[in-house]
């Protein structure tokens, strides 16, 4: 099997390259900034440097796909969040270019990495606890989130492309929050920016546990370790399973579990409107890079049922949600001794490499 992975230097792409090591597969990787010779998460990768919003993208993609059996499309941009058009050019325009190149070159299987954020708000019980949804839940997204809107649009154009002659088998994988220790610097850069002293704050919180962390009760999120998601992606490639698949470590994490991961005993139940207003004010002031739509994703998207992945892939996560998040937080605090992954986008921040590095 020959596979091309777009976004191969990021959180999910590097985990998939690790997972394929030792498997009977030839891997090519595509990214804007490729690793230096001898670096990267897997030896023997054939690298292609490309910005998917570039005018040369269609030709480079066709060349990269000329001899592959499957494409795993992980490339996605979540910054700069103040420039939605720039993100759209990569996320939606790039997905369109990937789909067109796959059809033009006769690729047999296209795997698209989507997100829980494509789902409409889900059901809750009488206590306000979110309930898991299967893949047939409406994929209309969260209108107030640019990330969600673009994930929905990308899925829509891929679905439309399936009706055309020569389209590959399409698998859409919808994970929860994807974490791994090596992605700590990348996640901190994208969501916190250079002004937040992440490591000192987390070290202090874990050394002197807080009685409560001000998090809204509505924050309830599905989580999956990147290595477990990579294992699911490999099983998708092996079996060529079509359609949508949820991937997460059940159960998801509620506000109290999130608070414990960051060194507190529980959540204090901060009103959601307060957190959203704070996120909005600081984002508009450009003090941090996370727009308030991400608060809406955490509060409104459902938890995920993974019954289909377990049944059709024989998949089960090795790490539960709490353990996966704890490993990430420990790395961010320095307890795990991690400085990031082996690619430019995953390396630790420095004074010269903050959130604006792309």
Image: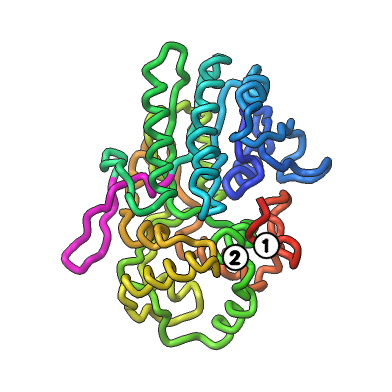
Residue plotted at (55% across, 82% down): 205
Q: Image point 81% across, 43% down: which residue?
A: 36
Relative vertical location of residue 34 with respect to residue 322 in this rendering, above or below: above
Q: Look at the numbered discs 2 and 1 and tell me whether their residues touch, using CB distance below 8 Å.
A: yes
Classed neighbour count for the residue bearing mark 1: other residues with Cα under 10 Å, few (<14), some (14–19), many (≥20) = some
Where, by quadrant of the figure, is residue 300 drawn? Answer: bottom left
Which residue shows up at 54% across the image and 34% down it? 73
Q: Give the extent of the magenta segment.
A: 115-133
Instruction: Tell me if residue 13 comes above or below residue 356 in the rendering.
Output: above
Q: Main secondary structure of the magenta part?
A: loop
Q: Position of residue 252 (x, y in %)?
A: 37, 60
Camera-side residue of 151 and 336: 151
Residue at far left of view:
126
Query: Which percent across, then down, holds residue 223?
Result: 44, 56
- For the residue pair 200 and 358, the one nearer the viewer reads as 358
Q: Quadrant of the image for the N terminus? A: top right
From where the camera sits, is residue 86 visible?
yes
Q: Is residue 180 above or below residue 333?
A: above
State the mark number for residue 354.
1
Locate residue 188 relative to residue 341 in the image: left or right: left
Q: Secondary structure at mark 1?
A: loop
Give the alpha-carbon distance from disc 2 to disc 1, as whole Å.
Answer: 7 Å
Judged from the image, the secondary structure of the residue bearing numbered disc 2 is loop
Residue placed under numbered mark 2 in the picture: 193
Quarter-wise, where is residue 251 in the image?
bottom left
């Amino acid at each position: 099997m020959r596979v091309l992975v777009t976004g191969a230097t990021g959180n999910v792409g590097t985990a998939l390259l690790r997972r394929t090591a030792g498997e009977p597969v030839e891997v090519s990787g595509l990214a804007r900034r490729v690793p230096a010779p001898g670096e990267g998460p897997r030896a023997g990768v054939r690298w292609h440097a490309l910005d998917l919003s570039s005018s040369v993208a269609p030709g480079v993609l066709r060349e990269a796909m000329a001899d592959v059996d499957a494409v795993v499309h992980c490339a996605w941009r979540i910054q700069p969040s103040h420039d939605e058009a720039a993100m759209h050019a990569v996320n939606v325009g790039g997905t369109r270019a990937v789909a067109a190149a796959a059809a033009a070159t006769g690729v047999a299987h296209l795997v698209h990495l989507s997100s829980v954020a494509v789902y409409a708000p889900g059901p809750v019980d009488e206590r306000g606890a979110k309930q898991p949804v299967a893949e047939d839940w409406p994929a209309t997204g969260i209108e107030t989130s640019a990330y969600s809107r673009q994930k929905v649009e990308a899925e829509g154009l891929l679905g439309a492309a399936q009706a055309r002659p020569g389209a590959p088998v399409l698998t859409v994988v919808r994970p929860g929050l994807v974490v791994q220790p090596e992605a700590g610097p990348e996640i901190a850069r994208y969501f916190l920016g250079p002004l937040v002293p992440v490591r000192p704050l987390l070290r202090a919180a874990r050394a002197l546990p807080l009685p409560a962390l001000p998090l809204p009760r509505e924050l309830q999120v599905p989580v999956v370790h990147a290595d477990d998601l990579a294992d699911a992606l490999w099983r998708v490639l092996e079996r060529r399973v079509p359609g949508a698949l949820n991937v997460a470590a059940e159960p998801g994490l509620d506000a109290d579990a999130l608070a414990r991961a960051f060194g507190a005993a529980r959540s204090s139940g901060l009103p959601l409107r307060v957190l959203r207003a704070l996120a909005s004010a600081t984002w508009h002031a450009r003090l941090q890079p996370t727009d308030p739509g991400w608060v809406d994703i955490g509060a409104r998207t459902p938890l995920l049922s993974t019954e289909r992945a377990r049944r059709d892939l024989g998949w089960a996560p090795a790490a539960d949600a709490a353990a996966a998040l704890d490993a990430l937080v420990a790395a961010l605090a320095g307890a795990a001794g991690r400085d990031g992954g082996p690619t430019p986008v995953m390396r630790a921040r420095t004074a010269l490499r903050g959130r604006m590095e792309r």
